[in-house]
Image: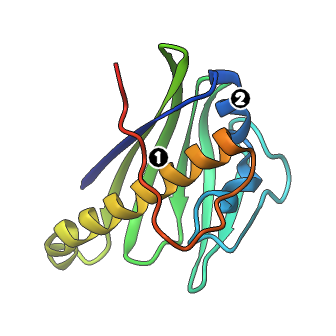
Amino acid sequence: MLQLNASVCIDAPVEKVWEVLSRLEAIQLWVRSIRHSYCPERDRGVGALRVCELSGATLHETITAWDEGRSFTYRGEGAPLMKRATNTWSVEPSGGKTLVRSAASVELKGGIFGRLLEPLVAAMSARLGAQSLASLKYLVEQGHPYQGTERLAAQPPSR
C-alpha cells in the first residue's frame, strides 16, 4: 500500500484556507485533472459525496470524517489502477500562515503487478500532488484560479 504525504504553507489565515479547501464542489479550481465536480446531495460533513469527472474516469469520493475548520477524510473509488484509496486533508496555523497537509493511502489493483507499479505511481502522484497544492496556494493567496501554462512551485512548509 502506498502512503503519499504532501504539504504546503499558504500565506493566509486558517479560516480562509479552510473556506476554499472545504468547498468540495470547487476542487476543479485547483486540481487541473478534474474537469468538473459536484455533490449530488449535500456538500459538507460525513456522508457527503463528491463526484469528480476526469477525461477518462469518474471518481466518487465519500466523506468519512469531518472536523469543521480542521480536517476531512474521504474514501475514493473509480480511479484507474486503484483498488481503494483514502485521503485526509488538514489545516493548522503556522506562524501567521496555514500549513495544509494531505495524507493518502492507496492500494493498487492487480496484486503483485500492482505492487510493481507502486514506485511509478508514487512518483507521478508526488508530482501531481505538488502541482495541486501549488494551485491551491495560488487560489487562496490571489483570490482566483491559476490560468498560466507553466508549472507552479509549492512553497515548502516552514516551522
**Image coords of residue 81 (percent x, y):** 37, 76
Can you say whether 14 is above or below 145 in the image? above
Secondary structure beneath dot 1 equals strand
Circle 2 residue: 16
Residue 21 seen from this side: no
Give whichever of 158, 126 is nearer the camera: 158
Spatial separation of the CA atoms under disc 2 and disc 1? 21 Å
Please rate how many residues cluster around mark 1, counting C-alpha atoms within 10 Å: few if below 14, some from 14 to 19, many from 20. Answer: many
Q: Which mark is residue 5?
A: none
Q: Are marks 2 and 1 in contact (CB under 8 Å)?
A: no
Secondary structure beneath dot 2 equals helix
Which residue is depicted at the point 32% across and 58% down?
Answer: 126
**Image coords of residue 113 (percent x, y):** 17, 79
**Image coords of residue 20 (percent x, y):** 71, 40
Can you say whether 155 is above or below 56 in the image? above
Please rate how many residues cluster around mark 2, counting C-alpha atoms within 10 Å: few if below 14, some from 14 to 19, many from 20. Answer: some
Circle 1 residue: 87
Q: Quadrant of residue 155?
A: top left
Left or right of residue 6, residue 110 in this image: left
Q: Residue furthest bottom?
A: 56
Q: Hey, what amino acid is under mark 1? A: Asn
Which residue is depicted at the point 51% across and 38% down?
Answer: 89
Q: Looking at the image, is mark 2 or mark 1 nearer the viewer?
A: 2
Between discs 2 and 1, the one toward the N terminus: 2
Indicate the quadrant containing the C terminus: top left, top right, bottom left or bottom right. top left
Q: Quadrant of residue 27?
A: bottom right
Give whichever of 43, 13 is nearer the camera: 13
Give whichever of 156, 28 is nearer the camera: 156
Q: Residue furthest right?
A: 41
